[in-house]
Image (spheres, helix red, strand yellow):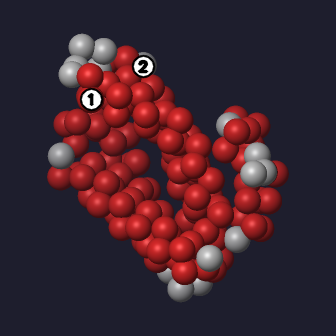
C-alpha cells in the first residue's frame, strides 16, 4: 500500500509542478476563469501557479514534515481556486458537451484532490487539517472515510 501512496504522491507532485508552470507559460486560460469580482486576475494566476509548483516540489521532499506542510498548503490552494473552477462551469455553458462535462467533473474531484495530499503524508496531517479553519470552510474534504 505504501508503494501505491508514493506513486500517487509522485504523480500529484509532477502534475502540480506542470500545471503551475502552465500558469506562467499560458496564463490567458487561467486569467479568463478568475471571477470578475476578484482584483488583478493575472497576479492571482501567477500566485496560484507559484504555490502549485511549490506544493508539488514539497511533495517530492524527502522530509515527512515538508511533505505534510506541502499537502496542507495544496489543500488551502484547492479551496482558494475553487471559485475559478465554479466560474469556469458558468463561462463554459456554450462550449461543446465534452468540455462542459470536464468543467463540471472538476468540481466534485476537488474533494479527493483535497484528501489525497493529507492521506499520502500522514494521518497527523489530516488531524491537523481537521483542527484548522479549512475544516470549517470545507468539511467534506476533511471527513473520515
Q: What residue do we see at 59% from left, 84% from top?
A: 63
Classify mark 2: residues with Cα within 10 Å, few (<14), some (14-19) or many (20+). Answer: few
Residue at the limit of the structure toward the top, as seen here:
94
Q: Is residue 71 visible?
A: yes
The tag on residue 37 is: 2
23 or 19: nearer the viewer = 19
Q: Secondary structure at mark 1?
A: helix
The answer to whether the residue labelled 1 contacts the one labelled 2, judged by CB atoms less than 8 Å apart, is: no
128 or 118: nearer the viewer = 118
Answer above or below: position of 135 versus 34: below
**Quadrant in which the N terminus appears:** bottom right
Answer above or below: position of 96 versus 31: above
Residue at the limit of the structure toward the bottom, as seen here:
62
Q: What residue do we see at 29% from left, 60% from top?
A: 18
Q: What residue do we see at 50% from left, 80% from top?
A: 61
Quick check: 130 left or right of 94?
Answer: right
Q: What residue do we see at 38% from left, 23% from top?
A: 89
Residue 71 position within the rendered picture, expressed as x and y whole percent measured from the top left: 58, 62
Q: Which residue is mark 1?
A: 98
Q: Residue 117's quadrant in the figure?
A: bottom right
Amino acid at each position: 500500500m505504501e508503494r501505491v501512496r508514493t506513486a500517487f504522491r509522485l504523480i500529484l507532485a509532477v502534475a502540480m509542478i506542470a500545471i503551475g508552470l502552465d500558469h506562467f507559460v499560458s496564463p490567458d486560460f487561467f486569467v479568463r476563469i478568475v471571477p470578475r469580482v476578484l482584483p488583478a486576475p493575472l497576479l492571482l494566476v501567477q500566485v496560484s501557479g507559484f504555490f502549485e509548483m511549490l506544493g508539488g516540489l514539497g511533495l517530492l521532499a524527502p522530509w515527512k514534515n515538508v511533505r505534510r506542510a506541502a499537502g496542507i498548503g495544496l489543500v488551502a490552494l484547492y479551496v482558494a481556486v475553487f471559485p475559478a473552477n465554479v466560474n469556469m462551469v458558468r463561462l463554459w455553458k456554450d462550449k461543446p458537451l465534452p468540455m462542459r462535462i470536464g468543467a463540471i467533473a472538476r468540481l466534485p474531484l476537488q474533494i479527493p484532490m483535497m484528501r489525497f495530499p493529507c492521506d499520502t503524508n500522514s494521518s497527523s496531517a489530516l488531524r491537523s487539517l481537521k483542527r484548522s479553519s479549512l475544516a470549517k470552510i470545507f468539511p467534506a474534504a476533511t471527513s473520515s472515510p
